[in-house]
Amino acid sequence: MSISQLARSIKASPTLKLNEAAAKLRERGEPVIHLGGGEPKSKAPLDAVLNCAAQLNTGEIRYAPADGLPALKKAVIRYTEDYYHHRVHPENVIVSSGAKQAIMMLLYSILEPHDEVVFPAPYWVSYPEMVRLAGGVPVAVTPEDGTFHPTMKEIDEVVGSQTRAIILNSPNNPSGAMYSREFIAEIVRYCEKKDLWLVMDDLYNRLVFDGQQAPNPYEFADDLGPASKLVVVQGVSKMYAMTGFRIGWALANPEVIEAMTNIQGHQTSGPVTVSQWAAIGALSGVQTSIVTLRLTLENARNVMVDRLLTIPGLHIHKPQGTFYCFPDFSAYERNSLKLAEFLLDKVRVVAVPGKEFGMEGHLRLSYCGAMKEIMEGVERIKWALDPNSPNEIFIGDRRLVRDWA
C-alpha cells in the first residue's frame, strides 16, 4: 500500500501523541501528571449548556448552512461589536468546526502552490503543516534577541515576492507572550502597504493577565472595505472552556468568506448544529465565566513561574496570557524531545517539546490544570534535573532514587 507524497510530508500532532502516551501510562496505574495539555479544566458556561440542551430536547437536529447558523452569525456580529468595536455583516462571517478549520479554509482559499506564509517562532504546532496541506511554504521568523517578540525588521527580511500571508497568534501558544500595541499597529499597516493577508489568530485574546488588554487590529487598519485582507479568527474553545464543542469562526471580506464557505461545504458541510446553539448561549449569556477563568489562570501562572524559577539555570519569560509557559531548559538538555521523554520516563510528567513549536531547548508547560498537579509536576521536574536535589523522592506511594547524573 502506498500513500501520497503530501500525506507523507505531514507529521502527527505531538500533543496528541503525548496524550496517547500519558493515557496508556495512566491505564497501567502510573501517577502521570500532564503539564502538556491545552484544555481548561473549568466547565462550559451554564448558558451554553442550557441552550444546547434546549435544542436537543426538540429532537429537531438538522443540517446547518455551510457557513453557520444565522443565529450564531448574529451572535458573532454582536460579540465583534462589543469586544472589537467593529461592525461586520453576515457576509463577513463563517462559522467552522473550530478555529483550526477556519484557518484551514482560509489557507485553501488564498494560497497558490508555493506561496509563502510567514509566522513568528515559537508558533502553534499546526501552522507549518496546515500551510503545507494548502500547497504553501511555511516560513518561520525567530527573534534574534532571545525573546518571543519579533521586530518588524525581522519580519520584513523574510517577506519576498512569494509571500502571501502573515499569521500572528497573540497572546501566543506556546509562549504566552503578547505582541505589543506598537507591533500590531506596524504590522497591520505593513500588510496593507504590501498587499498581504494578515491572519490574527485571536483565540486567547481575552485570557490576558496583569490588567492588560490585547491590541485590537481593527483599530489600526486604514482599509476595512470589501478588499480588506485583514482576517480575525476566534472561537469558544479556550475562553469559554468549550473545547469539545468545536466551534470557531473567521471574520474577513465577503469574497474570501464565500470561497471558504464553498470549500467547507464540500469538506464537512456546516458545523454541528447543537454545538452552534451552545456557542450562541455562551456568546449571548453571562460573561463571568471568562473573568473567573482568567483570574484562575493568572494565579496558576504565578504559582508555576515562581516554582520554575527555583530550578537553577532555567530561563523563563513570564507569560502575559494564555495558559502556557515556555521555559528554556537548554542548561540541562538542548534536545527538547529527548528531555520530554526523559521527564515522562523518570518522573511521569508530560511536557511538549519546544522543537515542535520552532524552538529547541524549550518545553511547553501548561498551567490550566489542577493547582496540586502544577505544584507537584514542577517539583518532580526540579528533582529530576537539579543535581542538588535530594537523592530520592516519593511519587504517590512509590520511592524513586536518582540513578542518573
Image: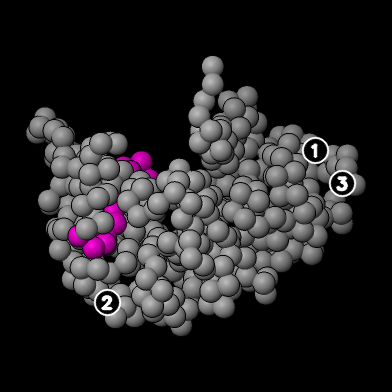
The amino acid type, in three-letter code, at marker 3 is Asn
The amino acid type, in three-letter code, at marker 1 is Leu
**Over which residues does the magenta segment extend?**
240-254
Instruction: Return the residue found at the far front.
Output: 161
Please indicate whether residue 146 sits to the left or right of residue 122 in the image.
right
Picture residue at 29% right of the left edge, 80% below the top? 222
Q: Earlier in the sequence, mark 2 or mark 1?
A: 2
Distance CA(mark 1)–CA(mark 3): 8 Å
Q: In the picture shown, does residue 215 fall above or below 99?
A: below
Please indicate whether residue 309 sits to the left or right of residue 109 in the image.
right
In this rendering, does residue 81 appear at all?
A: no
In the image, 343 versus 376, the foreground residue is: 343
Count of labels shown?
3
Q: Is residue 89 magenta?
A: no
Q: In the picture shown, does residue 350 fall above or below 152?
A: above
Picture residue at 54% right of the left edge, 38% below the top? 10
Q: Position of residue 336 (x, y in %)?
A: 71, 49
Q: Circle 1 is placed at which residue position? A: 400
Circle 2: element type? loop
Picture residue at 71% right of the left edge, 34% below the top? 397
Circle 3: element type? loop
Q: Circle 2 is placed at which residue position? A: 223
The amino acid type, in three-letter code, at marker 2 is Asp
In this rendering, does residue 156 appear at all?
A: yes
Q: Position of residue 211 (x, y in %)?
A: 43, 77
Q: Circle 3 is placed at which residue position? A: 391
Q: Residues within 10 Å of mark 3 (few under 14, many from 20)?
A: few
Q: Quadrant of the N terminus?
A: top right
